[in-house]
Image (cartoon, rainbow, N blue to C red):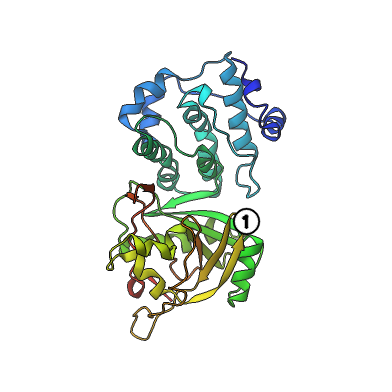
Amino acid sequence: MDVKALLHAHPEWLAHLESADGPDLVLPADPVPELLRLTVPHEDLGAVAGHQARAGQRQWWLAERCVRSLVSTMGSLDGPPFFQPLPELGPYFYVHVFLGAVPHTLAYHRELGIAPEVSWATLADLGRCMAVHRKRYGHGGLHAPFWLMLHARGVLYALGRLQFNRDTLSASVGEAVRAAGMPAGPGSPALGVHIPDFLGPLAPAACDASFALAREFFPRHFPGEQVRVMTCGSWLLDDQLGAYLPDDSNILALPAALPPAGTVRRRRHAGLRVRRARRRPGGAAPAHAAGAGHRRPPGRRRHLVRPPRLAPLLIHPAENLAGRPTWRPHVLDFGHAVRK
């Protein structure tokens, strides 16, 4: 198989891979113990181990350069071109790439003084993304390899129930943040908040603990990044979900809990709302239904922005809705989860 021919549709990526310098690819002779640490599902272990690339194969060239791509941009917010879908190389090609990157990611974490338990909890998302792929498509594979590049490059970290990735505010989100009176703007350091699947209930106490860990973790290990804002975005905040969900759904309670602070306009997702969490005296969330009558086509998203001392709204992925891939949320009790 001519691997480079597969990449001709992605010239920028191919040029990057050809120019990337870095270590030689080393894969364990027996990958199973490490795959288990990465939480690779048991039903995939045999297939992953049996299809591991070998030195001298054309796939080895590509796998090695993918690892070099990750290592050469380790810790940088300016990442390399995304890994592209390559079904011709089989469902587990990128599993081997991330397996080959593990020693380099761990070395970077050690340099920063990051605890091993945080490192392995972060890298365990590899197995979780394989489980998500099987749940969605009914067969083995790896969901969203481009997403796992953040983990492998030291940009995203799992801290308890939630994940946090180092980022900067885009122009549109940053302007909305500034207009809302928050101490940040376009290009300001920020943290993206994510809720992984297959990690149990989204309990308010667990989320409180994650935010507490994040407030301690990032200033300690990345002191040069003065984060003032966390963001969490989801199209699940679309008002039209009211046509599908029962009146007592947690999703429908969300707009009432968050008064609007501005509007974000982004390519592909117009009309995103920025909302700021507040509390009434005594800790109760305010009732505010501004914009409740507004309707947009499903698929557009609201983008929530919070100061780091406030908990962003969080939604836990689960099931399908009306035959479309979607999620059933468990919304945080702001009276409990938002801390000043």
- For residue 5, side relative to residue 334 (left or right): right
Residue at left offset 61%, top offset 20% = 3
Where 279 sits versus 7, above or below? below
Q: Residue furthest bottom?
A: 281
* Picture coordinates of residue 57, whole percent (x, y): 57, 14
Q: Is residue 43 left or right of residue 302?
A: left
Q: Secondary structure at mark 1?
A: loop
Q: Position of residue 54 (x, y in %)?
A: 52, 16
The relative height of residue 21 versus residue 277 in the rendered view (above or below) is: above
Q: Position of residue 229 (x, y in %)?
A: 55, 66
Q: Nearer the viewer, residue 240 or 235?
A: 240
Residue 226 visible from this viewpoint? no
Crowd band around label 1 with a 10 angstrom C-alpha radius: few (<14), some (14–19), many (20+): few
Q: Which residue is nearer to you in this view: 164 or 142?
A: 142
Position in image of residue 30 (x %, y %): 40, 21
Can residue 18 be seen? yes
Q: Nearer the viewer, residue 280 or 275?
A: 275
> At 70% across and 27% down in the image, what residue appears?
18
Q: Quadrant of the C terminus?
A: bottom left
Q: Residue at x 70, y 31 (%)?
A: 11
**Where does the N terminus fall, quadrant-wise?**
top right
Residue 106 lies, with reference to residue 240, above or below; the image says: above
Tally the numbered discs. Answer: 1
Identity of the amino acid at label 1? Arg
Q: Which residue is mark 1?
A: 267
Query: In terms of image quadrants, where is residue 328?
Result: bottom left
Q: Is residue 269 left or right of residue 334?
A: right
